[in-house]
Image (spheres, rainbow, N blue to C red):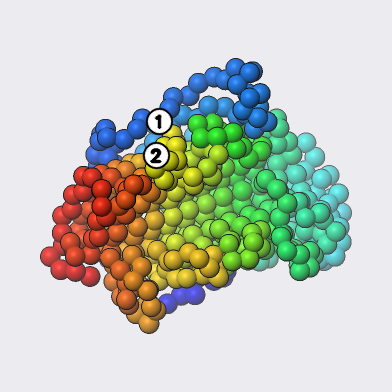
Amino acid sequence: MLDFDKSYDPRQNKLLIDQITGNKLPIKDLILETESLFKQARNLSNIPKPQESRSFSIREKLEGGAFRLTAEGSRLLEPTTILLDDDGNVVPDWKDKLDVEYKQLLANMKREINVVDYGAVGDGKTDCTSAFKKALGNGQVKVIVPPGIYVTKGITLPSWSWIIGSGAGTTTIKLHDKAPKGTRLITNANHWKGNHHLFVQGLSLDWNVERLGKIEKTSTWGNHSSCLTYANVTYGWVKDVEGINPGLHCFDISSTLYNYAGDGYRARGGSKYVWLDHVTGSGFGDDGITTHHSDYIFISNSHMCDPSGRAHQQGRSNSNGIEIDDGSRNVVLVNNSSARCFGGVEIKAHQNSSAASNITIFGHISVNDNRSFNFRHIGHHKQNDAESKSAYHIIAANLVAISPVYSDLYKDSAPRGMVVSAYKNVVINQFTIIGDPEYDFKRNPVIAVQYRARNVTLNRVTVKDFTNRGPCVKIFGGENHADSIRIQDCSPEEIDIGSDVQDVEFKTKTAAH
């Protein structure tokens, strides 16, 4: 078995997933099958309807607190449709918009220059902050960064900027020893007015956490303390980039500010139409890749592993490989991987924010994550909690979870292959979960559907090689029970249905796994 460490190349994920799942369906047929299951889930009507977007009076904004001053009403968008491009790659239906804007980026590159010509020295010692600032100027420039280690106190990108190195591990941009803890190593120049058409490519980004010593918490607040932050960016690309040991996130696709105005609200100034391809990261204090209040984000062929968790209290680190967080909409993940994180992929929101919605995962390998796939809207789970207005629509296919385990990152968290909480209209199609025969799973269920989840479809689930596991699927009952569950291709003795659960259907395999 591969180590899936920071040297792992995630561009082999697609082939590995097909080998592990034994997928015999042509990819086009798998897409159509998954789409059909999702349409069936959406057509069910026994769930609360989401609240429509509305405008807010000045009085309401003042009463709602400071966060509502920078918030807008949240609404559900039409979900993304998945397509195959001419090369057989899985892409979102809006990728052609990104392709058109990429051509615009190329057309607006007036000059191609070398940062060394502006005084940069890749010796790992010289402060090159001024050289990058001069080279980037007011944009419309492609800045070449040759092999070496370039020390800076932070780089800000004006619109129409392209910064390109000679490859991750060959060209490194490193944060200066005297940079404040809240520094973003690379970010866009104007978070308030926004920027557009940015491309970062072929670099390692070393946040240099060692400069902080044995400090208890490695991050400050909001979207600070990360290797790369796009905040209020429209049309952005990040390709072949490595994030190293950030205080918070390797890659944060974000709004100007995070926003906690409540469920039904989301931040203004979110990013839109951003593609991260073949990015890798390790040692992150919180999440490897995260999105907040941003729309139409595409993440492909990427790998996140081995977080430090040092942005959190020790033993309570919600450090995920990929986290699709508060207010994010229409995010598409294709053929990514994660290893030894709290969550491999977490789709969620905090109690006082809108949930991520319309999220598609097509291909992911999770290795030794505590919760391989974790979907939840915190604070909207129990009978006395408000029903989530925004936790809708997750589509996932071709998933692999390998040996979920207990983790020192979050010591009280029992391992799971998947947890679905509070979300409505969730379709999981072709999911393979492989245990470690030498690992005691302590009678835990492999998949948990719980906490007011509704309209959940599990199709072609394979569970094997676990020792001392509980049920393959546990539908939790009680006053905060799940409802309207469809399970296909899973043996009946492997399904545990709790009290008060309504409307459960399943079609069985001929033999248990």
Q: Earlier in the sequence, mark 2 or mark 1?
A: 1
- The local crowd at label 2, few if under 14, some if 14 to 19, many if 20 or more residues have their Cα within 10 Å, is many
Tell me the amino acid under the disc marked 1: Pro
Residue 156 in the image, given as x and y percentages of width and height: 75, 44
Q: Which residue is mark 1?
A: 50
Left or right of 304? Residue 395 is left
Q: Is residue 168 above or below residue 272?
A: below
Quarter occupied by the C terminus? bottom left
Left or right of 405? Residue 397 is left
Q: Which residue is mark 2?
A: 392
Q: Residue drawn 18% across and 49% down? A: 505
Q: Is residue 106 above or below residue 477?
A: above
**Nearer-the-camera pick, 86 or 395:** 395
Q: Residue drawn 52% across and 52% down? A: 323
Left or right of 50? Residue 476 is left
Picture quarter containing residue 405? bottom left
Residue 205 in the image, given as x and y percentages of width and height: 69, 59
Tell me the amino acid under the disc marked 2: Tyr
Residue 28 shows up from this direction: no
